[in-house]
Image (cartoon, rainbow, N blue to C red):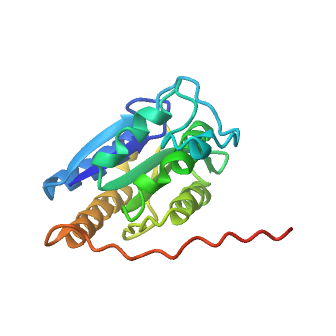
Amino acid sequence: MKVLLINGSARREGNTFIALSEVARQLEKHGVETEIVQLGNKPVRGCIACGQCMTRGLGRCAFDDDICNRIVEKLDEIDALVVGSPVYYGQPNGALLAVMQRLLFSAGSKLENKPAANIAICRRGGATAAFQTMNMMFQMVNMPLVTSQYWNIAYGREAGEAAQDAEGMQTMRTLADNMAWLLKKIHAGGNPDYPEREEWQPMHFIR
C-alpha cells in the first residue's frame, strides 16, 4: 500500500512539510509506503473550464506545463492521498487549490474510493475554514475522509515551529494510524469490494 502526500506550501521544508512528515513516518511504522510531493514555487495554471480533459478523454489536464499532470501520473499507483496546506487569509494556498481543482476534474476517477485527508497549518486563525474548504473537494469524488482525534491542524509561523505543537503532532500520528487501519481493512483478503455506483443524474436549477 502507498500513500501520496502533497505539500501545498511554497516552502520546501517548512511547517506543512513537518506535519506531513509526521504523518508519513507513522504510516511507514504500519508498513505503508509514502511519498511526499512538493508543490514548489513555480507558477501553476488555474482551470479555465475548457473541458478538453473530458471531451478528448485525456485522463489528465490539457495544460501540461506545470506540476498538475506530474501528480496525475502517480495516482494509479497509490491507495490514499493526504494534502497539506498553509493557511492564507483563512483559505488554503491558492496555487494548491488551482492544481487540485484541475487534478480532480480531469482525473478524479483515479481517486474514487481511495481514502483522503487534509492538513491545515496556520500561525493563529483560519485553519478550520481552510480545512473545511479542502475537505469539500474530496467529498465530491467518492473519497472516504480519514479522521483524527481533532481537526487535522497544527500551528506554527517560523519554519520548524509546528514541531513544537505537541497536540498537533499527535493529531498527525493519530490520522496516520487511522489511515493505515482503514487501508488494511479495505485491502484485507485481496481486491477491495467497492460499492456499485448509480449512474450520475445531474440536475440544474435553470433549464
Residue beneath the point at 35% across and 62% down: 171
- Quadrant where the C terminus sits is bottom right
* Residue 123 x, y percent position in the rendering: 54, 46
Whether residue 159 appears in this view of the structure is no
- Going by the picture, which residue comes out furthest to the right? 206
Left or right of 131, for residue 38: left
Q: Is residue 87 above or below residue 38?
A: below
* Residue 63 x, y percent position in the rendering: 57, 30
Whether residue 191 appears in this view of the structure is yes
The image quarter in which residue 98 lies:
top right
Q: Is residue 26 above or below residue 42?
A: below
Q: How many marks?
A: 0
* Residue 16 x, y percent position in the rendering: 42, 42
The image quarter in which residue 62 lies:
top right
Left or right of 189, for residue 102: right
* Residue 12 x, y percent position in the rendering: 40, 29
Q: Which residue is at the front of the view, 71 or 158?
A: 71
Q: Is residue 200 above or below residue 36?
A: below
- Quadrant where the N terminus sits is bottom left
